[in-house]
Image: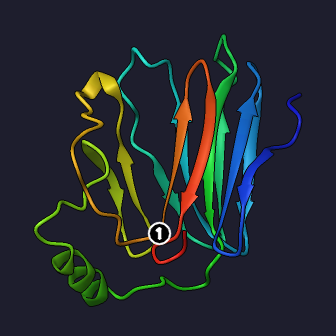
Amino acid sequence: MAAGPAVLFENARLRVLDVRVAPGCVERMEHHHHCCVRWEVLDASLQSPSPTFHPQGTASIVDNTTGAAERRDLVFEVLLASPRHTNEGVVRLMAAAAPYGTDPGQVLKLENDHVRMWDFRSSLGMDRNTFHQHVLDNAWVVIGDGSSLNVYVPGHI
C-alpha cells in the first residue's frame, strides 16, 4: 500500500500533491472542499496525457490493479472557492499583455474557469528565449533528473 500523498507546495490559493499508486492498488481521493486537477506523470519519451478536472464535492479514482509499475500523479488543488477572475477579466488581462504572448507552453491541455494547464517541454520544441508575459497566477513543475517547483503570483516578486 502506498503512503499518503506528499505535499510539494501549498499557499493560500494552491496545494500541489505528489500521489503514488502502487501496482495492484486502487487510490480514491475525495475532493470535498476544493476542486482539483489530476495529471499523470509519464516517462518523457511518451506523449503527455490530458489532465482531468474534478469539481469540489467529487472524488477521483485511479485503478492501477493491472499496472506493472507504480503510477504517479500530480494533483493541483485550487483552494479558492470561486475563480479569481471572471472570463471577461481574463480576456482583458490577456489583451493588455499585447504585444507579448501569454502562452507559457506549447500545448494547452485543459482550460476552464479555475485553471489553464499547459504542457511545455524541450521535446515539443520549447524555446527558452521566446518572450511571453504571465498575467495569471501560475505554478510550474519540472520533472526529470533534477526537481523544481516554482509558483509565481503576478504583481508579487
Residue 103: x %, y % from top left: 25, 55
113 to 29, vertically: above or below: below
What is the secondary structure assignment of the residue under circle 1? loop
Quadrant (top left, top right, bottom left, bottom right) of the N terminus:
top right
Disc 1 residue crowd, few under 14, some 14–19, many 20+, Cα 10 Å: some
Going by the numbered disc 1, the residue's amino acid type is Asp
Q: Residue furthest left?
A: 99
Quarter of image, res 79: bottom right
Considering depth in this image, is 56 or 154 the residue closer to the camera? 154
Considering depth in this image, is 103 or 15 the residue closer to the camera? 103
* Residue in view at x 62 percent, y 24 percent: 146
* Residue in view at x 24 percent, y 34 percent: 127
**Residue holding disc 1:** 137
Considering depth in this image, is 121 or 129 the residue closer to the camera? 129
150 to 95, vertically: above or below: above
Residue 9 vs residue 122: left or right?
right
Residue 57: x %, y % from top left: 66, 73
Considering depth in this image, is 114 or 155 the residue closer to the camera? 155
Quadrant (top left, top right, bottom left, bottom right) of the C terminus:
bottom right
* Residue in view at x 26 percent, y 43 percent: 107
* Residue in view at x 40 percent, y 71 percent: 136
Residue 122 vs residue 153: left or right?
left
Quarter of image, res 48: top left
Residue 140: x %, y % from top left: 50, 48
Residue 121 vs residue 70: left or right?
left
Residue 97 vs residue 110: left or right?
left
